Amino acid sequence: VEVPDEQRLVEWLDEICRDVYQRVESLDGGELASYIPELANVDPDRFAIATVTVNGESALTGDHAQLFTIQSISKLLLYGMALETHGRERVMRRAGVAPTGDPFNAIELDEKLHRAPNPMVNSGAIAITDMVEGRDLAERTDNVLSLFERYLGRRPDVDQAVCASEHASGHRNRAIGYLLLDQGIVDDRVAETLDLYFLQCSILVTAADLALIGATIANNGVHPITGDQIVGPKVARDMLTVALTCGMYDYAGEWAYTVGIPAKSGVGGGLVGMLPGVGGLAVYSPRLDEHGNSVRGIRVFEKLSRDFDLHVFDPE
Ligand code: GLN
C-alpha cells in the first residue's frame, strides 16, 4: 500500500474510514451487554470510526462525538498509571501477563504465582485499581479522573446511571475483590476499590477520545497534541504488549493471530487499537459478540489489518 505524504494523509485516512464504515454498517449481529442492565439502554445502531495519528491529525466518521462508557478500556490506562507510579515489580506481584482463554469476569487467580493472571481481565484490573493512591474514595477518584484528563484534554464525566447499575449488579466483581483480599493481593479497602472500579468503567468517552488515547500510547506515551509525556516509553511498551496478548479477553489469541494490532475492548462497545509510531484507531458500536467484543469493531479491524497490512508482524 502506498501511504501518501503528510498533506494528503488525513484525506486518505478519511476515505479509508468512510469506505470501511459503509461496508461494515450493514452488520447487525451481536447483542447489547445486558448483565449490567443500564448498558442495554443505548441505541444499538450507533457506529463510529475514529483515527488520530501520532502527529495529532484525525479522521472521524459516523457518531464520533457520541458518548459511551469506556468500561474495560479503562483497564489499560490504569495499568499504565500503576506501572508509572509503582514500577513493574510491584505491579507484577499483583497481576501477571498471561492471557487466560477464560471470560473477562472469571473468578480465578494464578494459584501458583499468587496473583491475577493479567491486568486486562477483571481480577487483574481490580488488583490494579487497588493501587490507585489517595486517602479516600474522593481523592482516588480525583486521581483517576486527572489521569483521563491528561489523555482526553478535558475532565471526563461519569455516567452515574451506569455506575449505579454496575454497583447494583456487580456481585461477581465483588466476589473477585474479596478473593483478592483473601489471598492478600489487595488490602482491606476492597469495598472502596470496587466502587472506584465501577466508577472507572462508567467514565464517558467518544470514539475520537479513544483514538487519541490510542495515538498517545502508540507515540511512546507522548500525547500527540499537548506533548505531555503521560507514561514513559517503557511503560507504553508494556501497555502495548499486554494489549496485544490480553486486550481482547478470551479472543486475544485469535485477535493477535488474525488482526495483530495491540488493542483493548470494552462492553460499552468501544474498541481501541494502537499502531506503534503511526496512531490510534477506534471503533464504537455497542452490539457485542459472545466474548464481549464489538461485532462491527472486530470487523473494521479485520478489514483494515488485511487491506493495509497492519499486523505488527506483517513482512515489510
Ligand atoms: N464494568 C464491566 C465489568 O466489570 C467491565 C467489563 C468489560 O468491559 N469487559 O463487568
Image (cartoon, grey):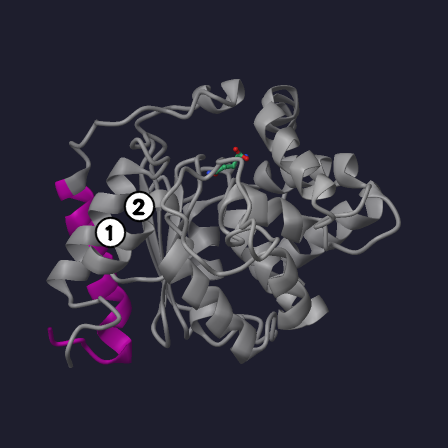
Q: How many marks?
A: 2
Check disc 2 and report its element: helix, strand or loop. helix
At 22% from the left edge and 48% from the top edge, which residue is drawn?
300
Residue depicted at x 28% and y 79%: 6
Q: Is residue 23 above or below residue 91?
A: above
Q: Position of residue 166 (x, y in %)?
A: 60, 26
Q: Residue at x 34, y 25 (%)?
A: 44
The N terminus - image quarter: bottom left
Name the foreground residue: 27 vs 14. 27
On the picture, is 174 further left or further right than 140?
left
**Prevailing SS of the magenta stretch:** helix
- In magenta segment, residue 15: yes
Residue 46 visible at all: yes
Question: Mark 1 packing: few (<14 Cα in 10 Å), some, or many (20+)?
Answer: few
Q: Which residues are magenta?
A: 1-23
Residue bearing the label numbered 2: 251
Please name the residue shown 30% across and 62% down the image. 261
Amino acid type of the residue that numbered disc 1 sits on in the rendered structure:
Glu
Question: In the image, is 66 to the left or to the right of 234?
Answer: left
Q: Position of residue 233 (x, y in %)?
A: 53, 79
Q: Position of residue 47 (x, y in %)?
A: 31, 37
* 176 and 213: which is toward the camera: 176
Q: CA distance from mark 1 to mark 2?
A: 6 Å
Asked which quadrant contains residue 245, the reply is bottom left
Q: In the orientation shown, which residue stands out farthest toward the front?
A: 112
Classify mark 2: residues with Cα within 10 Å, few (<14), some (14-19) or many (20+): many
Residue placed under numbered mark 1 in the picture: 254
Is the C-beta separation of discs 1 and 2 under 8 Å?
yes
Amino acid type, mark 2: Tyr
- In x, y percent, where is residue 205? 52, 44
Q: Is residue 220 left or right of residue 277?
A: right
